[in-house]
């Protein structure tokens, strides 16, 4: 998993509430167990027409928001079924940070485990960020995980809370496998001792 330290990127305003996981990645794309390749299908039903052509009014299809790494959206983002493909798809399309007033719990947890930083901010701050992204689509917003701040030049600076353990994992690029591998020496010592103590296992 790639570490998350400081992100300077364009922000796309997805002005919707209750964006569920079926909107994020529809069920027909859940056949794969690979974490890559899902980005093209993210938001499929609101991103493409029936012929597979991009809908020009969808925010992430607009030229000014192409390549956005930050998504600003409404409350209860990621609700619905508990599919880990949802953060896989969002990450694969280049989004590393999502700003919202609230998230569904399972999506929130899965985001951290896949290298995405979900940030909960008060509604008034989300509204200000949303408007800024609409008015100045080329402006860069800085998300500093170490300092726990979101800034835009001299226009605004917001602080956010994050669980210390999740912060540590993101800063160091540690998913569940990475955390386990940190104990590799202890695991090896245990296995060696067990072979001596119980060689029949």
Image (cartoon, rainbow, N blue to C red):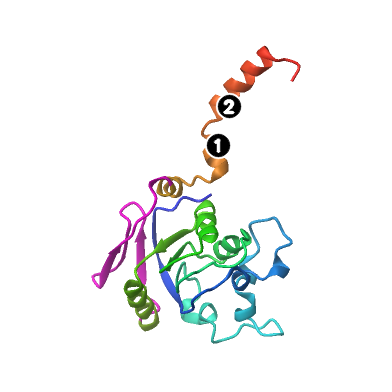
- Residue 158 shown in magenta: yes
- Name the side, left or right, on which 40 lies relative to 124: right
Give the residue at the far left of this rendering.
154
Q: Nearer the viewer, residue 176 or 48?
A: 176
Residue 128 picture quarter = bottom left
Q: Nearer the viewer, residue 64 or 11?
A: 11
Dot 2 crowding, Cα within 10 Å, few <14, some 14–19, many 20+: few
Which residue corresponds to the image point at 70% horizontal and 85% vertical from the top-left? Answer: 50
Where residue 23 appears, as percent x and y from the top left, is 60, 73
Task: Residue at the far right: name it.
Answer: 200
Residue 47 belongs to magenta span: no
Q: Which residue is mark 1?
A: 180
Which residue carries the number 2 mark? Answer: 187
Expressed as whole percent of the image width and height from the top left, the position of residue 156 reads: 26, 70
Which residue sits at x=59%, y=21%? 190
- Checking the image for residue 39, the label placed there is none
Q: Residue 194 versus residue 93: which sits nearer the camera? A: 194
Measuring 49% from the left and 58% from the top, which residue is drawn there?
Answer: 116
| Secondary-structure class at tag 1 | helix
52 vs 95, left or right, is right
Residue 134: image location, x then y, percent: 39, 82
Q: Quick one: label 1 or label 2, which is nearer the N terminus?
A: 1
Give the magenta range: 136-165
Label 1 close to label 2 by CB (< 8 Å) = yes
Residue at the spot 54% in from the left edge and 60% down from the top edge: 107
């Amino acid at each position: 998993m790639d570490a998350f330290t400081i992100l300077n990127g364009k922000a796309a305003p997805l002005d919707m509430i209750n964006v569920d996981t079926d909107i994020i990645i529809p069920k027909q794309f859940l056949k794969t167990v690979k974490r890559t390749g899902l980005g093209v299908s993210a938001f499929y039903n609101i991103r493409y027409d029936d012929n597979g052509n991009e809908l020009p009014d969808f925010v992430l299809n607009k030229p000014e928001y192409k390549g956005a790494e930050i998504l600003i959206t409404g409350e209860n983002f990621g609700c619905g079924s508990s599919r880990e493909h949802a953060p896989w798809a969002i990450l694969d399309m280049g989004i590393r940070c999502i700003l919202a007033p609230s998230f569904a719990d399972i999506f929130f947890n899965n985001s951290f485990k896949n290298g995405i930083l979900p940030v909960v901010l008060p509604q008034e701050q989300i509204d200000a960020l949303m408007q800024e992204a609409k008015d100045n689509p080329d402006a860069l917003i800085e998300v500093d995980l170490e300092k726990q701040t979101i800034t835009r030049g001299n226009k605004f600076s917001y602080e956010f809370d994050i669980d210390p353990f999740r912060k540590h994992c993101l800063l160091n690029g540690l998913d569940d496998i990475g955390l386990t591998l940190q104990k590799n020496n202890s695991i090896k010592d245990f296995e060696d001792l067990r072979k001596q103590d119980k060689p029949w296992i």
